[in-house]
Image: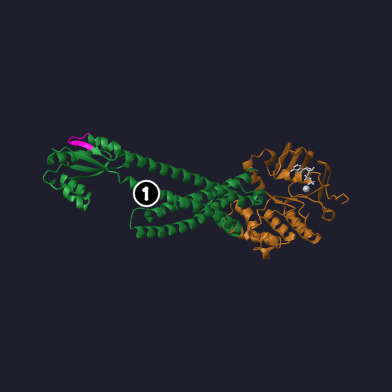
Chain colours: A green, B orange
Amino acid sequence: MKIRTVGRHIRQGFLNLSRNGWMTFASVSAVSITLLILGVFLLLALNVNHLADVVENQVEIRAFLDLTADSEDIENVEKELEQILGVESYTFVSKDEGLSEFREGFPEQDQDLLEGLEEENPLPDSFVIKAVDPQKTGEVAEKVLKLPHVYDVTYGKETVEKLFKVTNTIRNFGLVFIIGLTFTALFLISNTIRLTIMARGKEIEIMKLVGATRGFIRGPFFVEGLLMGLIGSIIPIILLLVGYYFLFSYVTSEFLILNVMLPLYPLALQIAGILLGIGAFIGIWGSMMSVRKFLKI
Amino acid sequence: MIEMQDVWKTYPNGSTALQGVSVKIDKGEFVYVVGPSGAGKSTFIKLMYREEKPTKGKIFLNGFSVEKMKEKQIPRLRRSIGVVFQDFKLLPRLTVYENVAFAMEVIETPKRNIKPRVMEVLELVKLKHKVRSFPDQLSGGEQQRVALARALVNNPSIVIADEPTGNLDPDTSWEIMDIFEQINTRGTTVVMATHNREIVDTMRKRVIAIENGRIARDQERGEYGYED
Ligand SMILES: Nc1ncnc2c1ncn2[C@@H]1O[C@H](COP(=O)(O)OP(=O)(O)O)[C@@H](O)[C@H]1O
Ligand SMILES: [Mg+2]
């Protein structure tokens, strides 16, 4: 195919869009509405996933050292921790810091019960450790336990396992839901586009009689499908991002918690990319499938 | 040059349209195909541009072995001939200009060559003033002139027409026939199925009469020969 023919197809594709008036409008609306619904649930799923991440990231390991461990031993443990794969970060908590933490857990009027603890601090030194992958906290904890001078680790095993079960279920459910919704969108949109092209079977017949090859007939339909998909996805992208921006500002200012929702950037780019991609794909796919039907005859 | 050798055509539903047709049409001839309706005229025409495939027999056209062609080669056959239909078959969403230009775009003609040539044929069919109109804004005669312009724009050596005046009033029909006569004088072969007694009897040409799927008569400067 020559360059000028490609140019011709692009021009003709645009022309067909404008001359098909309400047919184009129907297809573009179908794309917009379906992608809007898909987009809402996509944002929801991504944020739920994000929340699950936030919650999972609260999980930490507490590794307690032998009471006899001196500063050299502590340094050695630190070096060992450095070597363990899967450890994201660790902080040393001295026995004194441990004690004040412990103190804070008691109400004012009971503080006198704790008197005398300074002289004879029974708490060990410890490390607070975070795993790179929170879901692997258990494995990391086991490795840490094997280090010399570490006599115990805790990470709330049962609570954490339950938590991960819940977050994983939510994630899987979201994924299945999004995939199902995507296929529904594919089906609905390609069906609408098919209807608009069905009405043009006669035109395709005429083109064939004048000696047009299949490729030549397909060209403008390809462009048309692509354009319908792209135009149809721009509207929901704008609506979704503007809506998300306002919701985000509201939630962060009203509840004063910063990381409950994903920030607009890079989320905006991801959502725009996904919706444009799906729109373009179904636009082209829908129109090519319908043209194929007539080219067979 | 068009040649058919013992051509038979039975449609999938069992109705037989042609039974052993052999015919030879030389370059530059003007041929009317006449006969009662249902005789097989349209089938005869459709076999030439491979809208239908013969059940048996051979067809040669411009050096193509028409019945043997693969699906992929058919566009090349169709580009080498111009076809005109009773129902015009214009693209409804394209303007007059674009409909004619379409036939040139299909063969990937450079854009700068398309415009002068399209205007030239539109001049020939006297429709230059309607270039921007859409088919549904034109009369039947005007639509047929657009179709004729489209058939002629690539200078085909053969023009095939199936009852091109079938939907037109007598005056308009004569305008169309004048154009066919003109292009035939310039050397284009014309094959035209028609029901129009007045035209056949006035503008005398070779007449091939088909009856019941067979050639009943083949006569130079023949008459229409049927009561309407
Ligand atoms: N597509 C088709 N399918 C089945 N039968 C057909 C088809 N086209 C034509 N016929 C039959 O073939 C015969 C010849 O038809 P046709 O070639 O259209 O004749 P004409 O053009 O002379 O009126 C008729 O009996 C007609 O019913
Ligand atoms: Mg007929």
Q: Quadrant of ligand 1?
A: top right
Q: Residue B15's quadrant in the figure?
A: top right
Please state the extent of the stretch shown in magenta in the rendering: A146-152
Q: Residue B153's quadrant in the figure?
A: bottom right
Q: Residue at x 32, y 41 (%)?
A: A160
- The verdict on residue B114 being magenta is no
Q: Using a 10 Å C-alpha cutoff, classify the residue at mark 1 as few (fewer than 14 neighbours), some (14 to 19) or many (20 or more).
A: some
Closer-to-camera residue (B88/B75): B88
Q: Residue A13's quadrant in the figure?
A: bottom right
Image location (x, y in percent) of residue A62: 24, 41
The reply to whether residue A216 is visible in this rendering is: no
| Most distant residue in the bottom direction | B129
Closer-to-camera residue (A162/B66): A162
Q: At label 1, which amino acid type do we have?
A: Leu
| Most distant residue in the left direction | A119
Q: Is mark 1 within 8 Å of ligand 1?
A: no
Closer-to-camera residue (A178/B170): A178
Name the residue carrying label 1: A51
Q: Is residue B94 left or right of residue B226?
A: left
Q: Indicate the quadrant containing the C terminus of chain A: top left, top right, bottom left or bottom right.
A: top right
Q: Is residue B183 left or right of residue A246?
A: right
- The verdict on residue A150 being magenta is yes
Q: Is residue B146 left or right of residue B17?
A: left
Image location (x, y in percent) of residue B158: 71, 49
Image location (x, y in percent) of residue B223: 86, 50
Check disc 1 and report its element: helix, strand or loop: helix
Image location (x, y in percent) of residue B168: 78, 58
Q: Please give the chain letter of the residue carrying mark 1.
A: A
Q: Is residue B200 left or right of residue B136?
A: right
Closer-to-camera residue (A121/B84): A121
Number of callouts in the render?
A: 1
